[in-house]
Amino acid sequence: MRAFRRKSSLASKVSDLISSARLQVSNRLTGEGFKVEIKPRVGDYFPDLLIHGSRAIWAVDFSLGKGSLHFASIAQIYSTVAALEGEPHWPAPKAEGVVLTNRGLGGEINEVIQQFNIRAVEVSEEAAKTPEALAGRLIHAFKLAEAEEMATPHTSEPSSQPLPIDHERLSNRLEIELKPSAHPLSHAKRKAILDDPGFGHFFTEHMVTIRWTEGQGWHDAKLVPYAPLEIDPANMTLHYGQSIFEGLKAYRQPDGSVATFRPEANAARFQASARRLAMPEFPVETFIEAVDVLVAQDEAWVPSQSEQSLYLRPFMFALEVGLGVRPANDYLFILIASPASNYFSGGVKPVSVWLSEEYVRAVKGGTGTAKTGGNYAASLRAQAEAAEKGCEQVVWLDAFEHRWIEEMGGMNIFFVYTDENSKRRLLTPELSGALLPGITRDSLLQIATDLGYEASEGRISVDDWRNDNANGSLTEVFACGTAAVIAPVGSVKSARADWTIGNGLPGEVTMELRKALLDIQTGVAPDTHGWMHQVLAKGVRADVLGAREDGGDAEVS
């Protein structure tokens, strides 16, 4: 209990760094709608912070003097008190805990991990040098834990018993073996590619591969040179389509460092997709570690020009060979990366869209909320039809009434309304059970609110779109996604009518939101929501990789 039940004497020992970081965490999370208590009394325990999450209350205990940062679910404290003192002081919500340590896993830290079934996340010394870095790392860990908790089926039954130790999970903490290419691409050839990478045409020199086998779990994690795959003709993915993927980006920051945008959200969605397709769930922490390792190794491929980034594509598919409709017993996770400029050729310009009234992308209860290749294959005929009509993208309607707007291509869609007092509000189709919950969509709902706009989720029909456009109340429309960021919509075509949005040019709110999001991603604007995950600090790449190749515990993030 030593790590969790601290007396009030801790208050006299905390450093200025901890005090400042504690305040920053409180301010940032409070601004995002979380309730945060500083130095509350919980029984006879005095954590530095209590964070009221979506399903659990999280306790944070800084103790850098002992070389560790304790970040535990309050459920762990409740359960332990119950075990040691015979009865709980209060009902215990079900959750897991996290320990952040900057001195490796040993001694008291390891004892805590074993006793309380706690996930361990190592923190570099760099991340504990400044209040900003320490607060950012803690917020990242909290959001990762929250994402995992939200992705886990919830039981309303409280437990007063100590949570069982998940020895399998602890023993399966993966280390990614580095086997980099002995023949790196020359600087001149790489520069020629980065001068005009396009989107999805070129790939970096390495990839991360991790295997899952029934009875063994995740294993054989390694970074290797990018290379073709050898696939058996009877591979079950080719026949039954068990395949999922994600998309996220790494951005060069003004000081030369590199950061990814909301990787824990992609990791949680990747798990949700896996569940829907009866595939093994990939651990969130391993997902982020794989991204960190690949970006660190191929850091030279992260562009520094405006409007460019390194696009990351994690995917997983069935590896088992055989015929028979059932979940496979063997899977392969792969992460590749591709330098990217604008998704649409020609840069940011309004796109024309075709309303597909014959085909549908997905239905409630189907696979629409999963990021799986079959959904995209089902969209290709309608996309081809859109091209035949002279449009760049297709807009999907609901599957039952063919009336309600759902998505645009592989992206979410937003509508901007302006009232008689020039007040703007944003509306995006609600998540109906058939739509992919976009991470860019979620981010823009928050950014719009930050900028003073009313932003909501609801329903909008084809008739609403046409009529509101005609009466001038609907002034802008745009689509959003990781690849395109934000794409303005300039005109609409359908079997019944065609119309132009506003004056056909990118709208003011559209471009304001696009700039605000990109400024956060590229480090130009403050990251007030803790969305950016620093992969690599400026000037540490050689040390990090060297330590990893020597088998050390250096932390990439």
Image (cartoon, rainbow, N blue to C red):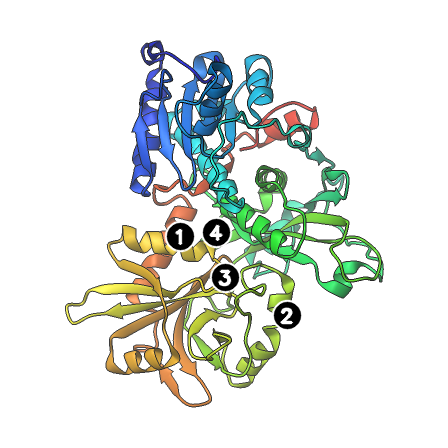
Instruction: Report the residue marked by disc 4.
Output: 305
Type of amino acid under label 3: Asn
Front position among marks 1 and 4: 1
| Residue 160 % position (x, y) | 48, 27
The label number, if any, that marks residue 113 in the structure image: none
Q: Position of residue 556 (x, y in %)?
A: 57, 32
Q: Quadrant of residue 56?
A: top left
**What distance separates the C-alpha of mark 4 from that of mark 3?**
12 Å
Give the labeled residue for mark 1.
443
Horizontal relation, residue 308 to residue 135: left or right: right
Taking the image as shown, residue 263 lies to the left or right of residue 316, namely left
* C-alpha span from label 3 to label 1: 19 Å
Marks 1 and 2, the one that precedes in the sequence:
2
Whether residue 271 is visible, yes or no, is yes
Amino acid under label 4?
Answer: Gln
Residue identifier under label 2: 377
Labels 1 & 4 near each other (Cβ < 8 A): no
Which structural element holds mark 1? Answer: helix
Residue, far bottom = 496
